[in-house]
Image: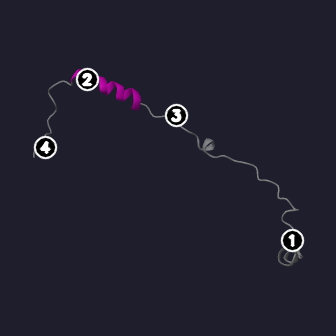
Amino acid sequence: MTHRTDARTTPPSQEAADAEVRRRDRFGALPERIRPQDTVETKPATVPDPARDTYNPDEWLIRYCG
């Protein structure tokens, strides 16, 4: 198998030229740049519920003996 390094001397067909135009229209430009500030979503933290997280020393009595 040989490798050709010379340039083509035949012009591309009309179909190839149309395909190149379509490809350039589709992939010829980069998409819009997205700023790093727009890639992060922030949400405020919720306030902890003190009634939910309180320690009940008699909880084991309710669970196991009640």
The mark lying in front, picked from 3 and 1, is 1
- Whether the residues at callouts 4 and 1 have beta carbons within 8 Å, the answer is no
Picture quadrant where residue 47 is located: bottom right
Would you say 51 lies left or right of 9 here?
right
Q: Earlier in the sequence, mark 2 or mark 4?
A: 4
Name the residue at the top extreme: 14
4 in magenta: no
Which residue bears the numbered disc 2? 15
Which residue bears the numbered disc 4? 3
Would you say 21 lies left or right of 60 here?
left
Which residue bears the numbered disc 1? 55
24 in magenta: yes
Picture quadrant where residue 5 is located: top left
Q: Amino acid at mark 4?
A: His
The segment highlighted magenta reads 13-27
Q: CA distance from mark 4 to mark 3?
A: 40 Å
Q: Amino acid at mark 2?
A: Glu
